[in-house]
Image: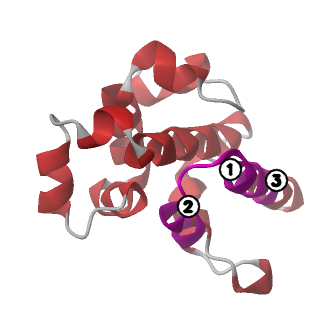
Amino acid sequence: MGMTATALRAAPREGSAFLRESGVSANIEVCDEVLGEDLTAYLAGANTIDEFRSWSAGPVLSSDTAARRLSAAVELISIFHTVNRTSQAASWLREVGVGGLVPARALRESTGDPATVKALHEAAEAFTAAS
């Protein structure tokens, strides 16, 4: 079983227990595998992939907003994984949704706060239920 399946099986659909249990590096690995490095870097708030790579071993991802955003991204991936549509998570994050909302941009511009994450959960659940 691959890292994504193992990690997502352990990840809750809501909350950040996965981040606490598995750590930031596991969230980065899941996001990289499912979303690609460019979208993972974007969600974390990096301006370039090289900038994101420089954060990986440092304090930027161990204790701040970037870590919360990637934890939220793993939660969103798990919603798609639950309905066997993991491969659609990246395109959904990039897609312009209702009211012009682009989920990836909303997550990047947030602090990973509960209100934004909840709204994104609801949008992902509605999308996966409708398709």
Q: Between disc 1 and disc 3, whose residue precedes?
A: 1
Whether residues under marks 1 and 2 lie with C-beta atoms below 8 angstroms apart, the answer is yes
| Position in image of residue 90 (x %, y %) | 51, 60
The C terminus: image quadrant: bottom right
| Position in image of residue 62 (x %, y %) | 31, 32
Q: Is residue 58 above or below residue 8?
A: below
User: What residue did someone put label 1 on?
Assistant: 117
User: What residue did someone put label 3 on?
Assistant: 122
Q: Nearer the viewer, residue 8 or 110?
A: 110
Main secondary structure found in the magenta portion = helix
Q: Which of 64 and 93 is in front in this view?
A: 64
User: Looking at the image, is mark 1 or mark 3 nearer the viewer?
Assistant: 1
Q: What stretch is highlighted in magenta?
A: 104-123
User: What residue did someone put label 2 on?
Assistant: 110
Q: Which amino acid does label 1 sit on?
A: Val
Q: Which amino acid does label 3 sit on?
A: Glu
Let me know if residue 117 is in the magenta part.
yes
Which secondary structure, mark 1? helix
Q: Is residue 9 above or below residue 63?
A: above
